[in-house]
């Protein structure tokens, strides 16, 4: 996902420079962007295009260390956001020019891409006299690899909605209205948290609409498990405390639910408690859950959705290669459980990730 994001940002920045008029703030002389006269924040170059997208240039030259370059880079970004608090991160692009992209600088680039969502372009001078540059891929500088997701790389947890009072029965009769609110809450919180995952709403068709110990509906949420996406060969080749720690966690646990799960569902959970007794149940990997689900003949999925870069990937699988007529003929819909299941099968098929346990 990071590879695609970096490639897209490089294409976008290069296309912008080629087709749009670019202006420099303060001309060719560095400009202090700090509101406080006592602070000195001088980006090497600050530019903007006709749509008021901003471009910050950081030139790592001479005796400037990587640590200094990284510190200055983030200081410029934060100060620009201070000047314009509502400026979206996607409207800020960073162009970093350096002879070398070591570990610190490359990690800073990845942080800009993944955590801040800004576009970035890394350049290395090939000929300083004629100003020729080559594009540098920071992932390759770090030796990072892309692995296909496996169905063990997603951990799931379910929110069971038990009918425990009269309003629960009315809620079951109007579950679509409730789900619309829950869906908005989950997607909004997921986007703010930078989460990647999906949910399914399941219905137990054999239960009657009465109060009791069996829930009619439950929401299963899946999140990427960071400990199942490790570069295992690299960790095995290292003899460090952190590599041993990560390998132990990855091998000792079938699934690990990221802590942001509880923040992700908190707003939706409080809303659902107006109608139901809500409990957390069935922590598992997606592989374990899907195998168990196949045996639940009385349970069906009635709705679903996806979010984050994972959601973008799923939507690309469903829609990118289809024509306009295909959309109507095949009734493609990423909020349809059958369509999402098919997309997940594509995602997980031919997995080349490394598992500790294939059971």
Image (cartoon, helix red, strand yellow):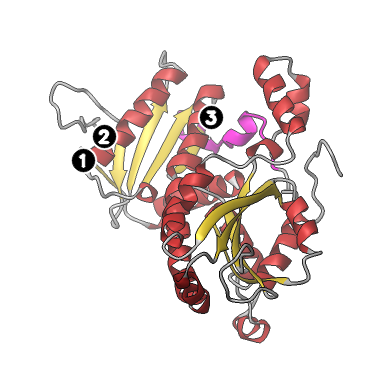
Which residue corresponds to mark 1?
A: 83
* Label 2 environment density (alpha carbons within 10 Å; few <14, some 14–19, many ≥20): some
The correct choice, above or below, for 155 with respect to 342 in the image is above
Labels 2, 3: front one: 2
Residue 307 in view: yes
Disc 1, SS: helix
For disc 3, the neighbor class at 10 Å (few under 14, some 14 to 19, many from 20) is many
Residue shown at 80% from the left, 39% from the top: 354
The alpha-carbon separation of the residues under discs 3 and 1 comes to: 27 Å
**Mark 1 residue crowding within 10 angstroms, few (<14) / some (14–19) / many (20+):** few
Judging by the rendered image, the residue that carries numbered circle 3 is 106
Contact check, label 2 and label 3, Cβ < 8 Å: no
Q: Position of residue 181 (x, y in %)?
A: 43, 67
Residue 126 visible here: no
| Span highlighted in magenta in the image | 124-146
186 w.r.t. 205: above or below = above
Q: CA distance from mark 2 to mark 3?
A: 22 Å
Q: Looking at the image, which residue is at 21% across and 40% down?
A: 83
Mark closest to the chain's N terminus, 2 or 3: 2
Q: Nearer the viewer, residue 73 or 15?
A: 73
In the depicted structure, whether residue 301 falls above or below residue 110: below
Displayed quadrant of residue 353:
top right
For label 2, the residue is 79
Q: Secondary structure at mark 2?
A: helix
Tell me which residue sits at (84%, 39%) in the image.
357
- Image quarter where the C terminus lies is top right
The residue closer to the viewer here, 188 or 169, is 169
Q: Are marks 1 and 2 in contact (CB under 8 Å)?
A: yes
Residue 114 position within the rendered picture, expressed as x and y whole percent measured from the top left: 50, 41
């Amino acid at each position: 996902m990071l590879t695609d994001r970096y490639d897209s940002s490089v294409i976008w920045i290069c296309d912008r420079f080629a087709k749009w008029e670019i202006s420099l703030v303060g001309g060719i002389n560095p400009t202090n962007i700090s509101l406080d006269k006592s602070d000195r924040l001088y980006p090497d170059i600050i530019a903007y295009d006709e749509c008021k997208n901003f471009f910050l240039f950081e030139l790592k030259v001479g005796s400037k260390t990587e640590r200094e370059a990284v510190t200055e880079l983030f200081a410029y970004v934060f100060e620009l956001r201070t000047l314009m608090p509502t400026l979206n991160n996607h409207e800020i692009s960073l162009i970093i020019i350096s002879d070398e992209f070591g570990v610190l600088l490359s990690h800073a680039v990845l942080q800009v891409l993944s955590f801040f969502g800004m576009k970035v372009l890394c350049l290395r001078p090939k000929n300083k006299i004629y100003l020729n540059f080559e594009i540098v891929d920071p992932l390759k500088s770090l030796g990072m690899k892309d692995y296909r997701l496996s169905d063990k790389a997603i951990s799931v947890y379910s929110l069971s909605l038990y009918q425990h009072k009269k309003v629960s029965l009315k809620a079951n009769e109007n579950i679509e209205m409730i789900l619309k609110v829950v869906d908005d809450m989950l997607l909004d919180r997921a986007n703010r948290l930078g989460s990647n995952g999906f949910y399914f709403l399941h219905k137990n068709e054999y239960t009657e609409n009465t109060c009791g110990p069996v829930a009619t509906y439950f929401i299963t949420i899946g999140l990427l498990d960071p400990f199942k996406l490790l570069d295992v060969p690299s960790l095995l080749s290292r003899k460090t405390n952190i590599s041993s720690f990560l390998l132990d966690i990855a091998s000792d646990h079938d699934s690990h639910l990221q802590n942001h799960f509880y923040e992700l569902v908190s707003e939706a959970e409080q809303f659902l408690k107006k109608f139901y007794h809500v409990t957390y149940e069935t922590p598992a990997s997606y592989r374990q859950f899907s195998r168990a689900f196949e045996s639940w003949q009385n349970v069906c999925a009635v709705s679903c959705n996806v979010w984050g870069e994972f959601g973008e990937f799923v939507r690309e699988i469903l829609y990118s290669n289809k024509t306009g007529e295909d959309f109507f003929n095949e009734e493609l819909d990423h909020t349809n459980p059958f369509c999402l299941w098919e997309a997940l099968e594509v995602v997980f098929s031919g997995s080349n990730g490394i598992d500790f346990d294939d059971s």
